[in-house]
Image (cartoon, helix red, strand yellow):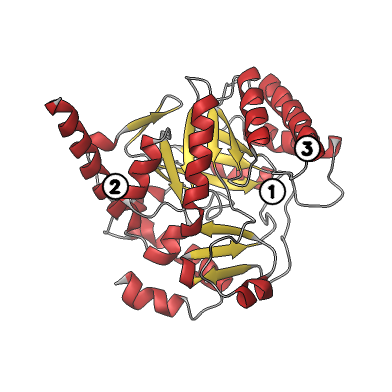
Amino acid sequence: MYESLIRPALFKMDPERAHDLAHKLAPLLAYSPFRFEYSAANLATKLSGVELKNPIGLAAGFDKNGHFVEFADRLGFGFVEIGSVCAQATRGNPKPRLFRLPEDNAVINRLGLNGDGAEAVAARLAAARFALPTGLNIAKTNLPEIQGDKAIADVLTSFEQIKGLPLAYVAFNASCPNTHEGILNERQQLNDIMSEVQKKNLGRLPVFIKMSPDSSDELISDIVEIAGVHDLAGFICGNTSLSRDGLRTDASRLAEIGNGGLSGAPLKPRALSLVQRVAKIKGAHQQIIACGGIASGKDAFEFLENGATALQLYTGLVYHGPSLVAKINRELSALLAQKTAQFAKI
């Protein structure tokens, strides 16, 4: 029904207007008799010691400001991630800043980290009842004057606001510089931030680093080393991509859209490669949350087989609708059962 009736109507709307409409309608889930979910014992897993009923999470980006944590379970997720949350409230980049690529089941966005700011989000979450284990993603406020020491202070301000909340984990975005000098600068800044975060992390919230699928081997190695030094819980692999390689969308349309981060189906190979590279060098106790191009049980199974503990999606919902999570979990449960049966025969 979604793909044949609802999606065509939504796709006639401006993408950001459709996104805003989804935000307005989402609270109705709290009063709906319908629950889009599938449960099976073999889907249960643990993320940083927290029990998840299934490994599928809602990625950061949909619920930037913590409005939906009380009924996120209605869509069948095992966990959710709020954010990205920044220290200061900002409106983000000028519109238009959100674009669909239907030929690729993908989206390009340059929203610019718009949001209410850490203080407002923390107050909202403090008064909420979390329906699911909830993570929170922190990013630097997207203002040009916030650089260097100001950037570190900005991120730490956000962490101070949220560190007392009953969160399953907190995540920090790592940038993806494309020069050796840029990587060295990113390494030093990330090391400084993680050092200060862990000094303030008295409640010992599990800390994850969110990495770009565009990351070089050098940057991946540096981030994993920093994560080990500061006893971080793991990695989110990955994020949106600046690459436009292999897209079906016409090059003239891509040029018309311009800059932005690509998400959706085309990210799967890059995200899977990132998971594989990180899995080879991370600490045994560290976990991976895979994110990028997951839209089927087969996709989910492949990421789990290559080292992920949990998974996240968002753009897939745009193209496949609210029943997608239940579909993935049903297919994934069958694949896990098949694997168990094969091992039992050995």
Q: Nearer the viewer, residue 241 or 231?
A: 241
- Badge 1: residue crowd in 10 Å (few <14, some 14–19, many ≥20): many
Location of residue 18 in the rendering, given as x and y in whole percent from the top left corner? 51, 71
Mark 2 to mark 3: distance in Å? 41 Å
| In the image, residue 222 above or below residue 105 | above
- Cβ–Cβ below 8 Å for labels 3 and 1? no
Look at discs 2 and 1 and give the one toward the viewer: 2
Q: Quadrant of the N terminus?
A: bottom left
Which one is earlier in the sequence, the residue at label 2 or at label 3? 3
* Amino acid, disc 3: His
Mark 2 to mark 1: distance in Å? 34 Å
Query: Disc 2 on helix, strand or loop?
Result: helix
Look at discs 2 and 3 and give the one toward the viewer: 3
At horizontal 82% and vertical 37% (from top left) the residue drawn is 181
Whether residue 137 sits left or right of residue 339 in the image: it is right
* Amino acid, disc 2: Asn
Look at discs 3 and 1 and give the one toward the viewer: 3
User: Which quarter of the picture shows residue 113?
Assistant: bottom right
Residue under pointer 3? 180
The answer to whether residue 292 shows anywhere in this view is no
Residue under pointer 2? 329
- Count of labels in the image: 3
- Badge 3: residue crowd in 10 Å (few <14, some 14–19, many ≥20): few
At horizontal 44% and vertical 66% (from top left) the residue drawn is 25
Location of residue 30 in the rendering, given as x and y in whole percent from the top left corner? 37, 56
